[in-house]
Amino acid sequence: MIHIVVLLLVGLMPSSTAFAQETLTFTTEAYPPFSYRDDTGTNRGAGVDQVTTILADVDSPFRIEIMPWARAIALAETQPMHCVFAAARTPEREKRFKWVLPLFVDRAILVTRQGSGLASLDIEAAKGRLVGTHRADYTEVLLKEMGFGSVDVSADFGTTVRKLVEGRIELMPMSESVFLEMLAQGTPLEQGVTLSTQPLGFACNLGVPDALIAQMQAALDALISTGGQDRILASYGVARPR
């Protein structure tokens, strides 16, 4: 009888590894070469591969969902067992999430339409132009904090790019690596001035267990120290900021 009672009590105790049985959902946007679906519908990218490697090391079930950025980051903030990647760790976001980083260091640059004559503008001159970005991206806050007066906010990254190419906006910020990927694909863009350099990583819901956050950070640290991160980035043509 004593053994039965002990077993029952043990069964009622919370397991320190209970979170490992819960599926962790990673949300992200279509933002090649970091995250995108290939022609077969498979999620790929320098960020996707790092998520997959890290969660395999942690041995925790997970899934990745691609959606507009505003929804992706909102879900991570409001839903348990959700993380969004790759999110810039900014002062405004710091206390809203638990963080695992860096997946990479992002150089945000201003980009203009090819032939617009605006690529040589400095920051002060660019502030007088119509600049576009997408909702809930960290550059939306960054542009306003830097004093850009006319900021057009679209639903997603792709819409902002279309507006730029069509001449409906004059400039937009994007990752330098994303710009180089789009340039290689023939998108008529030109690189302008650098806005900022930010570490990007997982921004996880505050309810994600601290132990799981620590395990993911340790797995990422190991990926970096063994050169695995550099190999993943290089396989997608992502160069570290100079």
Image: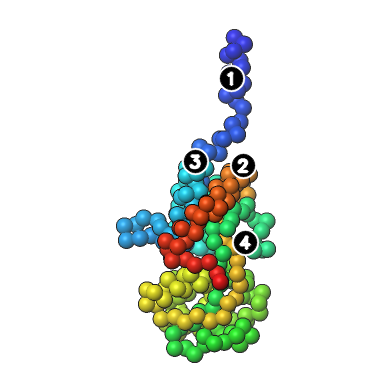
First in sequence: mark 3 or mark 2?
3
Given the image, on which type of amino acid does mark 2 rest? Ala
Report the residue at 64% width, 63% height from top: 90
* Element under disc 1: helix
In the rendered image of this protein, does residue 70 appear above or below residue 80?
below
Q: Is residue 130 above or below residue 17?
A: below
The amino acid marked with disc number 3 is: Asp
- Where residue 200 appears, x then y in whole percent? 57, 61
Mark 3 and mark 4: span between their CA atoms? Answer: 26 Å
Answer few, some or many: residues within 10 Å of disc 3's Cα (few below 14, many 20 plus, some between 14 and 19).
Answer: few
Q: Which of marks 3 and 4 is in front?
A: 3
* Quadrant into which the C terminus falls: bottom right
Task: Give the x, y percent position of residue 93.
Answer: 64, 60
Q: Give the SS element for disc 2.
A: helix
Residue assigned mark 3: 59
Q: Name the residue under label 4.
A: 89
- Of 232 and 46, which appears nearest the observer? 232
Residue occupying the point 59% across, 63% down: 199
Place of residue 89 in the rendered image (x, y in percent of width and height, measured from the top left): 62, 61
**Mark 2 → mark 1, Cα distance in angstroms:** 25 Å
Label for residue 8? Answer: 1
Q: Residues within 10 Å of mark 1 (few under 14, many from 20)?
A: few
